[in-house]
Amino acid sequence: MDKMWAGRFAKALDKTADDFNSSLHFDCKMYKQDIIGSMAHAAMLCHKNIITKDDFKKISSTLSDILVDIESGNLSFDSDAEDIHMFVEAELTKRIGDTGKRLHTARSRNDQVAVDIRLYLRDKSNEIIKLLKNLLDVIVKKAEENADAIMPGYTHLQRAQPITFAHHIMAYAMMFKRDIERIEDAVKRMNVCPLGSCALAGTTYDTDRDFTAQKLGFSSISLNSIDGVSDRDFCVELLSAYATIMMHLSRFSEEIILWSSWEFKFIELDDSYTTGSSIMPQKKNPDIAELVRGKTGRVYGDLMAMLTVLKGIPLAYNKDMQEDKEAIFDAVDTVIQCLNVFPPMLSGATVLKDNMLKAAQKGFINATDLADYLTKKGLPFRSAYKISGQIVFECIEKNLTLETLSLEEYKAHSDLFESDVYTAIDLKVCVEKRTSKGGTSAASLKEQIDFIKSV
Ligand code: ARG
C-alpha cells in the first residue's frame, strides 16, 4: 500500500526501515482515544463550516463503526499503516472514500498524537486512582482489625519503640494518599488541549480550538502551538508519580517479605499469594511481593527513558518522541498490574499478633519510656537517659528484662523509682500514652483512619 505521503518520493521506503519506523504494533493501544479525538475534530470542522454536515455525519458514524469493529475483534491492526493515526484514517477512507480524506484538514499527526497520549493518560490515571483508593480501603480495614496488635517499631532495622501494626501500616496509607494527589495534580496540568497546534505553527483555517477542547473534556487549550506539539512534561510528571507509587509498594513488599520469614513470622501470607519451591518441599515463598519489588525497577527505567529521550531534541516535533509511548504503556501496565495484585495479597495475610507481641517484649523497646518515667519525676532527660542505659546494661548482664528487674534493683540506680514504674513500662501503656498528634495512641489512630476514609 502507498504511504499517505508517497507523492513526494520516487522510491518506496525500504522494508526494514519501514518496520523500524512503524509504531502501530504498540500505539494501537490508543485506538479509542485516536477515534474520539478525530470525532471531536470532525465536529469542529463542521461547526466552522470547513466540512459539510453530510460529510461530518458520514465521518462520525464511520468512526463509530470502526471503533465497534476494533472492540468486537472484527477489525485487526494487521495493516502496514505507519501508526494508529494513519491506520484509522486509512480505514475511514477505505470505507467512505473522498469524504474520509477531508478529516485531516487543519490537523497534523503531531497535534493528534499529543492529544491521544493526554487522553490515554487521563483515562489510565483515573483507573490508577481508583485502584489506589481500593488499596487505601484494604489498609484501613486491616488497621481497624489490628488496632491492638503491639509490635516493635524499628529504626536501623533494630527494635526501637513499641507501636501497633495498625499504626505501622497506616503510614503507607498516608503515602498512597499523597500518590493520589500527585496524579491528580499532574493530570490538572496535563488537561490542556494541544489540538489545533497542527504541525507546529497553527493553521490558516478559521478553527475553533475551544470547541474541540471542550468536547474532549479538556479544561483549556495550549497557547503556544510549538509547545502544544513538543511538550511531554506531563509524561515525565506522571511517570514520576507512577515511579513513586512503585517505590511505596516496593517498601511495603519488602516488609511483607521480611515479616513472612521465620526470623520475624509477624504475618502469614495466604497460600493463594505464595509459591512453592521445585526442590525444597518446606518452602512457601512470597513471590508476588518480590515481583512487585522487582517491577519497581522497570518503572524507574521508564521514567529515565522518558527523560533521556527528551533531553536532546530541538523544537518542535521529532520522531524520537514516538519513543515516549512504550515507556508510558509499560509503566501504566506495570502499576495497574501491581495495584491489582497487592491489595488482595495484603488483605488475605494473617496477622500473627502473638509473635509480634513476643518480639516487642524483647529488645528493651520500652527503655525510652523508662527514661521518660524518671524525667517526669523531675530528673533532667539526659541524666534519666544515662540511668536507663545502665539499667538496660544490667538487665543484659543478668539476662533479665525491664519488666523482671526487681524494685530494689531499680532503686539501686535511683530512689525516684516506685512500684508504678512497672505500669509506666507496660507495652500497652507505652503505646497508649503516646497521645501526641500522629503518635501511637488509639485516638491518634482513629484520627488517621478518619482522615484516610475521607479521601
Ligand atoms: N507515530 C508518531 C508518534 O508517535 C505520530 C506522529 C508522527 N508525526 C510525524 N511528523 N511523523 O510520535
Image (cartoon, grey):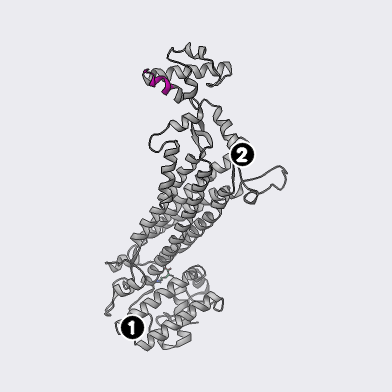
Q: Nearer the viewer, residue 192 or 166?
A: 166
Q: Secondary structure at mark 2?
A: loop
Q: Nearer the viewer, residue 111 or 263?
A: 263
Q: Is residue 431 left or right of residue 396?
A: left
Tell me the residue at 48%/16% (across/down): 390
Q: Main secondary structure of the magenta part?
A: helix
Q: Is residue 196 left or right of residue 308?
A: left
Q: Is residue 230 above or below residue 448?
A: below
Q: Secondary structure at mark 1?
A: helix
Mark earlier in primary sequence (1, 2): 1
Q: Which residues are magenta?
A: 371-379
Disc 1 vs disc 2: Cβ atoms closer than 8 Å? no
Question: Residue 107 in the image: x percent, y percent?
Answer: 35, 76
Question: Residue 290 in the image: x percent, y percent?
Answer: 57, 47
Question: Residue 188 in the image: x percent, y percent?
Answer: 34, 60
The residue pinned by badge 1 equals 46
Q: Is residue 152 above or below residue 81?
A: above
Q: Is residue 339 left or right of residue 239?
A: right
Q: Indicate which disc residue 112 carries.
A: none
Q: Indicate which disc residue 261 carries.
A: 2
Residue 376 is covered by the magenta coloring: yes
Rounded to the nearest angstrom, the CA distance separating label 1 from label 2 is 65 Å
Quadrant observed for ligand 1 in the rendered image:
bottom left
* Tag 1: amino acid: Cys
